[in-house]
Image (tube, coloured by chain):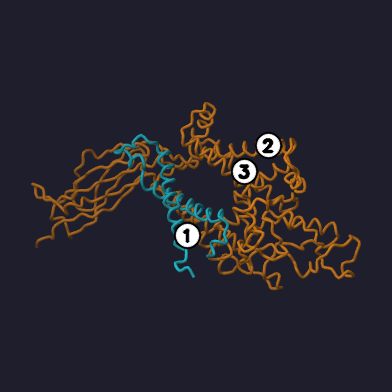
Chain colours: A orange, B cyan
Amino acid sequence: MATKDPNKSKKSNSLYASDATIYPRAVSGLFAMWRSIGVLILLGIYYIIPWMEWADRQAVLFDLPNRKFHIFSLTFWPQDFFYFAVLLIIAAFALFFFTAIAGRLWCGYSCPQTVWTELFMWIARKIEGDRPKQIKLDKMPWNAYKIRIKATKHVIWLILAAYTGFTFVGYFTPIDELAVRIIELSLGPWEWFWIIFYSFATWGNAGFMREQVCIYMCPYARFQSAMFDNDTLIISYDEQRGEPRGSRKRDENPVEKNLGSCIDCTLCVQVCPTGIDIRDGLQYQCIACSACIDVCDGVMDKMGYERGLIKYTTENTRQGKSISLFRPRILVYASSLLIMILGLGYAIATRIPLEVDIIRDRTRLFNETDTGLIENTYSLQIINKDEQAHSYTISASGINGIKMRIKSNIIEVASGEVRDIPLRLQVDPYDLKARSTEVMLSVIANDNPDIEIVEAARFLGPTRQR
Amino acid sequence: MADDTLPTCQKTVSVLWPAFLMAGLATILFFTAFDPAVLLQETRFADVSRLGAYSTGFFLFWLLTTSSCALTCFFRKPCNPK
């Protein structure tokens, strides 16, 4: 995307000053409708999910105090971090994939910053009115009317922000208990802290900082241009058709006045949430929300001109070349995504809720017992990652006549518990073929033979004397 | 120095914000590997709840990453007056 440095542009620089507030005008149209649908679905998901139940517990609960994540029927432990890492890589590749195809779809339709900003702007418009009224209100000296309007807006914003913060913490502590304790004012200090912290973050980000978050704070905004090529969808003003711009009456023939299609009504600038002029070309600040497309199409309709003076297009289309969807970068992103999603799905579907680690006693390689057997000492770690307790049977194999010395080979492990069990393996030296032999330790749940893990370990012994 | 042209607010944000992101990442990685309840059980902080330990850990990480970001800014000052 364009490389215009926001710090060098006078306008952007002044964004840090309070005088450059942007008042985006309300817009309706095809893309505005899609964004509203997106906003409603995403907000619905966010606010409803913590209240969903699954088998007597909260369906989605990232239970930090108990160190386990519940996602519907699945429970993840810190040992399952691998899945989380793969999930994050999948999310990153999905972002790359959609960016390469359709540009900043994420920014325009689904980024939380956009979603909550839309919601907050909608509330502001309901209370203060649209752009002209908001500008007028802010210019007005402080009086009873202005105080009343502003106070109403902030009270509603703050209530919504507080509920957002409460919901956020509800993903980490059971939300029904949280609701009860908040009414009783009996929350722990850190729960208070995070609810208030997140509420203020919502209020500040969606109410005040808005486009500045995208311009100054968002890392994705800075590197998304790396995924762009000449076939990526961008929002673009058709300069050839629009210029020379100029105002005219509806019945005037633009050709006679030597004018292009742009009537210079500046509505595209007024609706822009980042306050840029799309007619200046592709800019880093553009979050591809397509508000300018909607508003310009409306103007074109009124003027009786063809729609699409500002439209989704690609660099190649603009130059009259054909576009191709199947280009190397798309194929690479798509195939990596597909492989990782299938892999993760397979890994989670076949995941065994049990983890076994074998640690050899490092202080000595082996012992010889009184009866002449060779003995190796191990520490067996069993982690029960299932929702219920299990008793497991431990057995050893791999060498003829291998014996296991253990307190009890049936071990009870509670849900989420980690048990360390010392054990010794004994082998007749005549059965040892090499200095290091592979042995297998099997841990199997007594109530469910599907929960079995066989873990390999090395058994060390003396070289066989011939 | 190029930085002098930046508003103070942007300078502050450019130190605090990346530090915040990395502190969040460090907190996730650290507490995935180490359970604070186990780490603290032999110390005087044994009664601190996990949520408290995570939060305190996050702010300590943030302090650390902020110091690092701030030092980077500090050392970007040119050594020669001209």
The amino acid type, in three-letter code, at marker 1 is Cys
What label sits on residue A343 in the rendered view?
Answer: none
> Which residue, given by chain and number where applicable, does mark 3 sit on?
A43
Quadrant hosting residue A388: top left
Chain letter for the residue marked with disc 3 in the picture? A
Do pointers 2 and 3 mark residues of a single chain? yes
Residue beneath label 2, please?
A: A151
Task: Indicate the position of residue A207 as horizontal and vertical percent values.
Answer: 64, 45
Q: Mark 1 points at which residue?
A: B73
Q: Quadrant of the N terminus of chain A?
A: bottom right
* SS label for mark 1: helix
* Chain assignment, label 2: A
Is A114 left or right of A363, judged from the image as shown?
right
- Residue in view at x 91 percent, y 61 percent: A251
Residue located farthest toward the top when viewing the structure as drawn: A184
Q: Which residue of the protein is positioned furthest toward the right in this rendering?
A: A251
Q: Dot 2: within a 10 Å radius of its alpha carbon, few (fewer than 14), some, or many (20 or more) residues?
A: few
Decide: is B14 above or below B36: below
Whether residue A217 is visible to the viewer of this picture, yes or no, is: no
* Residue at the front extreme, as displayed: B81
Chain letter behind tag 1: B
Q: Distance between the residues labelled 2 and 3?
A: 24 Å
The Cα–Cα distance between marks 1 and 2, rounded to whole angstroms, is: 40 Å
Q: Position of residue A346 (x, y in %)?
A: 46, 52
Please tell me which residue is depicted at 60% across the width and 66% down the height of the picture: A228
The earlier-in-sequence mark between 2 and 3 is 3
- Gap in Å between the C-alphas at discs 1 and 3? 39 Å
Q: Which residue is drawn at 66% across and 58% down?
A: A288
Left or right for A246, reference A114: right
Indicate which label's residue lies in the foreground, 1 or 2.
1
